[in-house]
Each structure stands twice: as C-alpha cells, then as structure tokens.
C-alpha cells in the first residue's frame, strides 16, 4: 500500500517580514499624518497669540509715545507705532473671528477709532485710556486658552 503525502505549502519567512514592514509603514504614516495635523493647529494658535501680544506691545509703545508727540515727525512716529500694532492684530483677526466674531469686530473698530483720534491730534487724556483698555483686552485674549 502506498501512502501519498500531500506536501504542505510552507510560506516563506520573507512574506511575514514584508507583511510586518507594511504594517509598520501604515502605522507610521497614520501617526505622522495625525502629528502634522495637530502641529498645524497648534502653530496657528501660537501665531495668533504671538500676533495679539505684538499688537499689545505696540499699543504699549503708543501709550508712551502719543502724549509726547506734538505736530510733525513725533506725531507721525506715534501713528506709525499704532499702525504696526493694527497690522499685528490683523494677522490674528481671522483666527479670533472664527472664535468670536463680535470681539474681533469690536477690536477692529477700536483700532479705527484710535487712529482717527490720533490723526485729529486729540487730547492724550482722551486717547491714552482707550489705548490702555485695548492693550489690556488684547493681552487678556492672548493669555486665554
């Protein structure tokens, strides 16, 4: 009597290595994709905070410069500082508007009012307190989560 043996097909260890490598690549790709998506969100938030702080620092300089400015170059210097602070806020405005559009528009309106008052050479007693309130509001927004 003849016994036939059916040969079992053995899988080569190379297949297991390739399958493990593929699994590692897929897992690494998913991890990388998630980390870059989180990093982009975090970097946007960091840029918003940085821009708000820069705007607040510009207003701090404006608060010091405006009372000292009279006509001419000194007045133009205070206006230039205010304009730089406004541009810094404009970088943060889209992200801020996504969270609270009313606050973003109120701050924008306050910058416009300060610029108008400064261009009209209004009394420092009228301009400085508004600039200080705006500076404090920007710092509060920059420090809130």
Image (cartoon, rainbow, N blue to C red):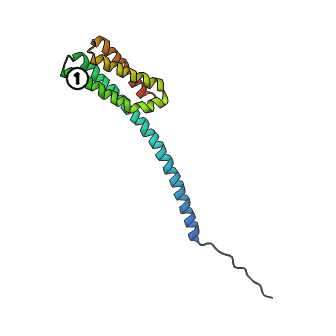
Place of residue 13 in the rendered image (x, y in percent of width and height, measured from the top left): 58, 70
Observer-nearest of 140 and 75:
75
Identify the image quadrant of the N terminus. Answer: bottom right
- Mark 1, residues whose alpha carbon is within 10 Å: few (<14), some, or many (≥20)? some
Coordinates of residue 144 in the picture (x, y in percent): 45, 27
Where residue 56 sits: x, y (%)?
A: 34, 25
The answer to whether residue 23 is visible is yes
Give the residue drawn at x 53%, y 58%: 24
Q: Nearer the viewer, residue 111 or 37?
A: 111
In the figure, is residue 77 to the left or right of 141?
left
The residue tagged 1 is 76
Q: Residue at x 53, y 51 (%)?
A: 30
25 to the left or right of 53: right
Left or right position of 9 against 110? right
Residue that extends furthest to the bottom in the rendered view of this protein: 1
Residue 105 occupies which quadrant of the picture? top left
Q: Quick check: 25 above or below 62? A: below
- Residue 15 in the image: x percent, y percent? 58, 69
Residue at 26% across / 26% down in the picture? Answer: 80
User: Which quarter of the figure has residue 53?
Assistant: top left
Query: Among all residues in the image, which is located at the extreme left?
Result: 72
In this rendering, is residue 97 above or below 4? above
User: Which secondary structure lies at badge 1?
Assistant: helix
Residue 137 appears in the rendering: no
Viewer-proximal residue among 97 and 57: 97
Q: How many marks?
A: 1
Q: Name the residue: 43% across, 32% down.
A: 94
């Amino acid at each position: 009597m003849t016994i036939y043996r059916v040969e079992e097909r053995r899988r080569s260890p190379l297949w297991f290595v390739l399958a493990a490598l593929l699994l590692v690549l897929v897992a690494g790709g998913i991890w990388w994709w998630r980390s870059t998506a989180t990093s982009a969100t975090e970097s946007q938030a960091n840029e918003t905070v940085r821009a708000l702080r820069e705007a607040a620092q510009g207003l701090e300089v404006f608060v010091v410069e405006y009372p000292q400015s009279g006509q001419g170059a000194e007045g133009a210097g205070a206006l230039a500082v205010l304009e730089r602070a406004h541009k810094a806020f404009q970088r943060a405005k889209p992200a801020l508007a996504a969270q609270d559009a009313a606050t973003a528009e109120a701050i924008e309106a306050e910058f416009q009012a300060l610029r108008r008052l400064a261009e009209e050479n209004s009394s420092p007693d009228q301009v400085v307190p508004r600039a200080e309130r705006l500076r404090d509001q920007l710092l509060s927004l920059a420090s809130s989560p």
